[in-house]
Amino acid sequence: MSAPSTGGASRDGYGSALLKLAEDPRVVVLEADLGKSTKSCLFRAEYPERTVSMGIAEQNMMLVSAGMASSGKVPFASTFAIFTERAFEQVRNGIARPGLVVHICGSHGGIHTGTDGSSAQSIEDLAIYRTIPNMTVMHPCDDLSAEELTLQLLNHNMPSYTRTARNKVPRIYDEESVKKIKIGKGNIIKKGNDVAILACGVMVNEAKIAVKKLVNDGIDACIVDMHTIKPLDGGLIEELAKQCGCIVTVEDHSVIGGLGGSVAEFLSRNIPTPLEMVGVDDRFGESGGTSELMSHLNIDSEAIVKAAKSVIKRK
């Protein structure tokens, strides 16, 4: 299990990827008054002529992106995750329905943002975009994986939504191991046979912490970085369901409609398997410190340990 010593925020990986993508003249970047926070400001500083700052106008940003895509450009449009939601109809009808290749990045998603409070904590974005036909939905776990997945979007012929995070977390990947990840394919971080823990985003690190605790109880858990929520890697899930006999999903998102909901839908249709979901219950978030909130809302490593022990008993 790779354990690089340094860490980074996934939004930083998105910003660095945009700079690398600038080598392709088709790439353009759109932002809605939050370039410094989403890190699209890095691209703007080097390529101002290929950056469109829309101001606080997310709906307009999505449709301008659609127009650019229809004209042969490859637009990357970013703002806070919560603010992309006000442009849902434009994404649905202006981007996804005609199949225009626009890549949307929603930063500062989940309750991990802490003191921003419930009005800024998008805990439903993955579910919302997963319901739209033709959309790819991703939630990378660190800066290196966010960079790699964003780079792969250049040759991805479908519109996409990627959620990134503000806070830094320990790196899950290093410069070599990150090359293994692919859009639409879950990546096994640690092998195990007793329970499969499928996590996305900042929760992959929490899953690693939980697995170390489970070892003390003689439980050998598998960890999967399920960075792509849609299309879901059903082949890997079926393989792990047969191998481990039970699954835990872990996400900084509502338990309704996100990674947990997606996996539950797949299992119920294909290979019924005991499942526990660690995520935010049917409620809004609240203001507080990150670790304090994760504990309060039962999405920390202790919650994962509890879920793993519970689901194993149901095998």
Image: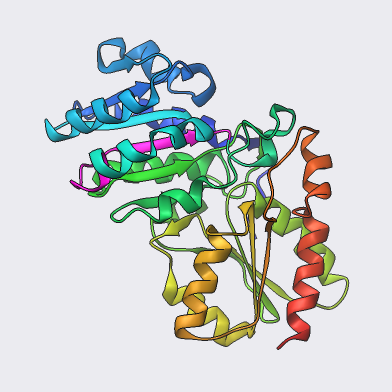
Q: Looking at the image, which residue is at 52% across and 47% down?
A: 140
169 sits left or right of 101 in the view = right
Residue 107 magenta = yes
Q: Looking at the image, which residue is at 30% across and 56% down?
A: 133
Res. 37 image quadrant = top right
Q: Quadrant of the C terminus?
A: bottom right
Q: Looking at the image, which residue is at 84% across and 78% down?
A: 218
Residue 252 magenta = no
Q: Quadrant of the N terminus?
A: bottom right
Res 309 visible: yes
Res. 281 image quadrant = bottom right
Which residue lies most toward the left here? 71
Q: Which residues are magenta?
A: 95-108
As rendered, which of 227 and 266 lies closer to the eye?
Answer: 266
Q: Looking at the image, which residue is at 42% across and 63% down?
A: 185
214 sits left or right of 165 in the view = right
Q: Position of residue 83 (x, y in %)?
A: 49, 30
As rendered, which of 202 and 20 lies closer to the eye?
Answer: 202
Q: Position of residue 230 (x, y in %)?
A: 41, 59
Q: Position of residue 41 (x, y in %)?
A: 44, 17
181 sits left or right of 197 in the view = left
